[in-house]
Image (cartoon, coloured by chain):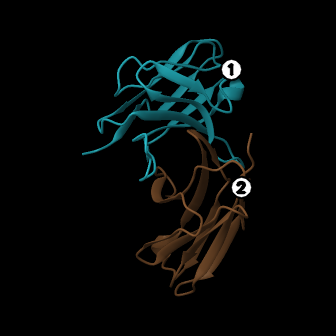
Chain colours: A cyan, B brown
């Protein structure tokens, strides 16, 4: 089944403790992206990647890192999480042409206390 | 940051009603316009991707139109059903940077 897999689905952590949210897709998509969703706001793009070893900042990259060492994986790294990073995170992927829209992962609900 | 606005914020209709929502975007920053349907506790699912001025796309009872010159897109649902209840998102593709609107939450009462 074609899908984007995010892990974990839920995570509660403490301020300053490094964490990684994994994202993997099995559709050979070139383009991958991370978003956060907060109440009253639309999905906001954190980082995106056009292909292996090519990443770029979205609208809200502060406090996040990403890497794209393999085509299928695009992990989101929070080196020192803070409470304002408490949010619902989505990974998404598509072909570069993006004629069919994104395929989204199931989401990761992160709480930083 | 590009401002993508959706209206209305929420909408309550009766089963069988037809309805439409609007997505507005800066017309000078345009590569493509996406529509997604997002049901509660699920992930957004792609409905349409439109690139050309005057584009019209249809999927069953749902259709969308695009006006890139004036910077808006309409999503239409004909004969709404309770299973159409969801949040409908539009997103502006500004050459690989995406800007989502806050969505229109549709509730269809049986």
Which of the chains bears the disc numbered 2? B
Q: In the rendered image, is residue B84 in sight?
A: yes
Disc 1 residue crowd, few under 14, some 14–19, many 20+, Cα 10 Å: some
Say what secondary structure mark 1 lies in.
loop
Camera-nearest residue between B58 and A61: B58
Frontmost of labels 2 and 1 is: 2
Placement of B109 over or under B101, stated as above or below = below
Q: Quadrant of the N terminus of chain B?
A: top right
Instruction: Using the rendered view, name the quadrant where residue A43 is placed.
Output: top right
Q: Residue at x 29, y 36 (%)?
A: A26
Placement of B67 over or under A94, stated as above or below = below
Q: In the rendered image, is residue A9 in sight?
A: no
Say what secondary structure mark 2 lies in.
loop
| Badge number at residue B103 | none
Report x, y in % for residue A23.
Answer: 41, 29
Placement of A84 over or under B84, stated as above or below = above
Q: Residue at x 67, y 53 (%)?
A: B101
Report x, y in % for residue A108.
Answer: 50, 35
Report x, y in % for residue A69.
Answer: 39, 16
Q: Residue at x 63, y 13 (%)?
A: A80
Q: Residue at x 64, y 31 (%)?
A: A86
Relative placement, left or right, of B89 versus A51 is right
Placement of B49 over or under B59, stated as above or below = above
Relative placement, left or right, of A53 versus B91 is left
Residues under labels 2 and 1: Cα distance?
36 Å
Which of the chains bears the disc numbered 1? A
Instruction: Using the rendered view, name the quadrant where residue A106 is placed.
Output: top left
To which residue does mark 1 refer? A82
To which residue does mark 2 refer? B27
């Amino acid at each position: 089944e074609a899908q984007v897999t995010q892990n974990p689905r839920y995570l509660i952590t403490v301020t300053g403790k490094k964490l990684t949210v994994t994202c993997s897709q099995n559709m050979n998509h070139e383009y991958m992206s991370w978003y956060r969703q907060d109440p009253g706001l639309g999905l906001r793009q954190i980082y995106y990647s056009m292909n292996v070893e090519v990443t770029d900042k979205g609208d809200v990259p502060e406090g996040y890192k990403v890497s794209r060492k393999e085509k299928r994986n695009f992990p989101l790294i929070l080196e020192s999480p803070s409470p304002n990073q408490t949010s619902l995170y989505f990974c998404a992927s598509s072909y570069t042409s993006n004629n069919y829209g994104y395929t989204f992962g199931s989401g990761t609900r992160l709480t930083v206390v | 940051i590009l401002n993508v606005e959706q209206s209305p914020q929420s909408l309550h209709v009766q089963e069988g009603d037809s309805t439409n929502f609007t997505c507005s975007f800066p017309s000078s920053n345009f590569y493509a316009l996406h529509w997604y349907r997002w049901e509660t506790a699920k992930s957004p699912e792609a409905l349409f991707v439109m690139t050309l001025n005057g584009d019209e796309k249809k999927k069953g009872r749902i259709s969308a139109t695009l006006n890139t010159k004036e910077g808006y897109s309409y999503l239409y649902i004909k004969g709404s059903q309770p299973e159409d209840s969801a949040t409908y998102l539009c997103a502006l593709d500004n050459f690989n940077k995406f800007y989502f609107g806050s969505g229109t939450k549709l509730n269809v009462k049986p």
